[in-house]
Image (spheres, coloured by chain):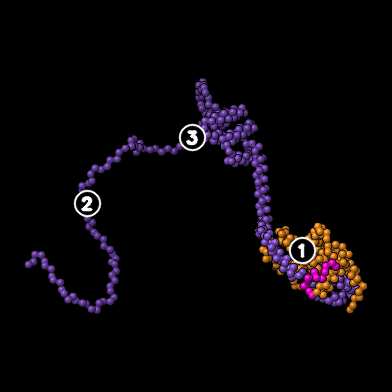
Chain colours: A purple, B orange
Amino acid sequence: MAFDLDNILEDCLQRLSQGETLQACLSRYPAQAAELSPLLRAAARLEEQIRLRPSAAFKARARAQLYAHMEAHPRKNRRQWNILFPISRLALGVTALLLALALAGTALAQSALPGAAFYPWKLASEQAWRAVSPDPMEFDLALAERRVDEIVAVSGNATAQETAFKEYQRIVIDLQKYQNPIAQSRIQQALTIQEEKIKSTGFLPVDAATPIPTNLIQPTQIPVSTQDVLPLPKATLIPSILVPTHIIPTMVSTKIQLPTALPTKIQLPAALPTTIELPTILPKIQLPTILPTQIRIPTIIPPLPTLPGLP
Amino acid sequence: MTPKKASLDPVADELVLVRRSQGGDQDAFARLYDAYIERIYRYVYFRVADEQLAEDITSQVFLKVWEKLDTYRVDSSPFIAWLYRIAHNAVIDHYRTKKVSIPLENVSPAEISHEDGIDEKLDLQIESQQLRDALKELTEEQQQVLILKFISQLSTTEIAQQLGKQPGAIRALQMRALQGLARYLNLESEQVYGI
């Protein structure tokens, strides 16, 4: 019942606000009219207070005060930022995540040994650091030391050692650019220690793996058939170009002989052409369509020229 | 009961005005001020029962709204509900800090400066006093519901949003509040004519 009265009261208040009279509204709900009536009249008395209005003077004064306040505290146009904020927040988040991943990856890569997935990352990060290093030579020496440590660390893994050694060699070549005697002394000192360290691991790089024999021992027996010892190489046809010897100059002349005199006679062709080919199509001649109707005869006839030999 | 006036309808381009105001447009905010000043004033006046104080608090409410516009999210609640929340907090702050209220009977007629005629103003003032006395007998929630519904002209849904309750709970509160008010105003004993 109470729930019903809530809704009935709400319905009546709605109708009254739309202009329906109290009596008309109560007549819609005769069973609840006695209960509804005081509630609706209380509501009507409250709503009468809507006539309560601030004075025009206050409204004008408060408006002026508001404008003065707005002038003193201007709002920056933050709406654009509000719109962009979710985007910029996402971009910032992604950037921060990438940065964190890059830093974590770089930190993780520092302990990577040759052959590990992060080893190229380690080398790349070293190059980045080298670019901003205040002392590139010392940095290179430190890198060389690092490579040596790697060679020591991966002892027993020839491939990994070879990778580290190649990187070491690259650094050593780079170090050759420092020609300053003091620098060279420092480099030489460091490299000597490093080479000793490498030797201590027993690692021999591919180039130095086959030592050059210092004393040759003559073979005591020559095999009768080499086929038993070594397989014969497969015969291959190597194309060759034979250059005739006569076209190869033995000596290149250093002087150019210029003609001393111009020819005195020019040999003309002995016979002239006997036939002349005439064009088969003659050009079209345009004749005037209008002939002159009057011919003016000159009034003065020029004197005849005297012919030589005539009296 | 008087039908709702056109001026009390929601501002047609309210959303546009709010967005422009958030962007720093002073004229747009002045239009929002014009649209809502009376409702906010009436709400404050009914809570503090002093015209001068109601004017001061109402002015402060709009200055505060201008400063806090960034915090208003269009999709969270209607703008008017947000305004009432600030007005409500301003009234609470006033009582918390000042702990002073001027009884309505102490306000002399000379100070009453409402727009209507002087007799009508006085009648309205007396009526307001009676209603305020009756409202005092209700719980804070019941007072809030009645003031927001009948003085500020908010819908049941808007009040529910404002007070963080379900519309059904607001309807029940409204009924109990009106029953209490009718009792204190001695309306229950009056005869219902014409039924």
Compute the Cα span from label 1 to label 3.
112 Å
Give residue A271's position: percent from left, percent from top: 21, 54
Visible residue check, residue B43: no
Magenta stretch, residue numbers: B105-117
User: For the point 68% across and 55% down, which residue is it?
Assistant: A86
Give residue A6's position: percent from left, percent from top: 86, 68
Q: Residue furthest right?
A: B189
Give residue B102's position: percent from left, percent from top: 83, 64
Pinpoint the chain carrying mark 2.
A
The amino acid on which the numbered mark 1 sits, given as a three-letter code, is Asp
The label nearer to you, 1 versus 3, is 1
Q: Secondary structure at mark 1?
A: helix
Side (left or right) of B179 relative to A52: right
Q: Are marks 2 and 3 on the same chain?
A: yes
Pinpoint the chain carrying mark 1.
B
User: For the point 82% across and 66% down, which residue is it?
Assistant: B49
Badge count: 3
Side (left or right) of A96 relative to B89: left
Q: Dot 1: within a 10 Å radius of its alpha carbon, few (fewer than 14), some, or many (20 or more) residues? A: some
Side (left or right) of B124 relative to A57: right
* Position above or below: A108 against A8: above
B81 or A147, which is in the foreground? B81
Q: Secondary structure at mark 3?
A: loop
Quarter of the image with the C terminus of chain A in it: bottom left
The numbered mark at residue A235 is 3
The amino acid on which the numbered mark 2 sits, given as a three-letter code, is Leu
The label nearer to you, 2 versus 3, is 2
The amino acid on which the numbered mark 3 sits, given as a three-letter code, is Ala
| The image quarter in which residue B62 lies | bottom right
Compute the Cα span from label 2 to label 3.
65 Å
In this figure, which residue is indicated by the disc labeled 2? A268
